[in-house]
Image (cartoon, rainbow, N blue to C red):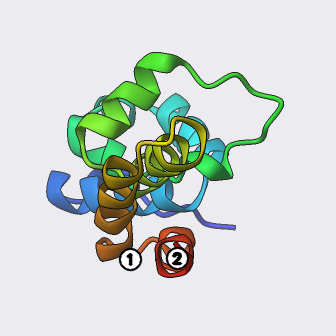
Amino acid sequence: MEYFPLLELPEEIQALVVERVARNSFQDLYVLKASSKSMKVLAERRGVYYFYDVLSVPWGLNMPSQLLKSCYAEGNPSTLYIKGVQFYFTFGLHDEGLSLMKRASDAGYERAVYTHAIT
């Protein structure tokens, strides 16, 4: 099987590949990061945090709090959803929780669309 020379593509295209991989799978993203130094640099750019789906991480893994903070700072829909649900149902902060769930819903995050609609 012949391999595609990803590193020969322009950096903008490489960045798009990293974003799509981040959207699909944490495991694939870490494999991609391990493949080369340039992929690692692209995968650790701030904009990539927007594309993570933190709810797709296997529950056995402890997610570093800094990663969650970075995702939240980027406006990552899955972290907005998690915070919204936490604020609404755990802390009783209904306005803040609904606001966060609405932001995640507006970004197209399916779980947030459903949860926001029923609350």
In which quadrant is the N terminus drawn? bottom right
In this view, 111 is above or below 91: below
Report x, y in % for residue 31.
60, 39
Badge 1 density bin: few <14, some 14–19, many ≥20, Cα 10 Å:
few
Residue nearest the observer in this picture, 26 or 112: 112
Number of labels in the image equals 2
In this view, 88 is above or below 1: above
Q: Which residue is mark 2?
A: 110
The picture quadrant where one finds residue 66 is top left
Residue nearest the observer in this picture, 93 or 101: 93
Tell me the amino acid under the disc marked 1: Gly
Residue at point 52% right, 53% down?
53
Q: Which residue is mark 1?
A: 108
Tell me the amino acid under the disc marked 2: Glu
| Label 2 residue SS | helix
Badge 2 density bin: few <14, some 14–19, many ≥20, Cα 10 Å:
some
Q: Are marks 1 and 2 in contact (CB under 8 Å)?
A: yes
Q: Residue furthest right?
A: 60
In this view, 54 is above or below 81: above
Q: Is residue 27 left or right of residue 36?
A: right
Residue at point 56% right, 62% down?
24
Report x, y in % for residue 81.
46, 55
| Label 1 residue SS | loop
Q: Is residue 42 visible?
A: no
Between the C-alphas of marks 1 and 2, the distance is 6 Å
Report x, y in % for residue 103.
28, 63
Residue at point 29% right, 58% down?
99
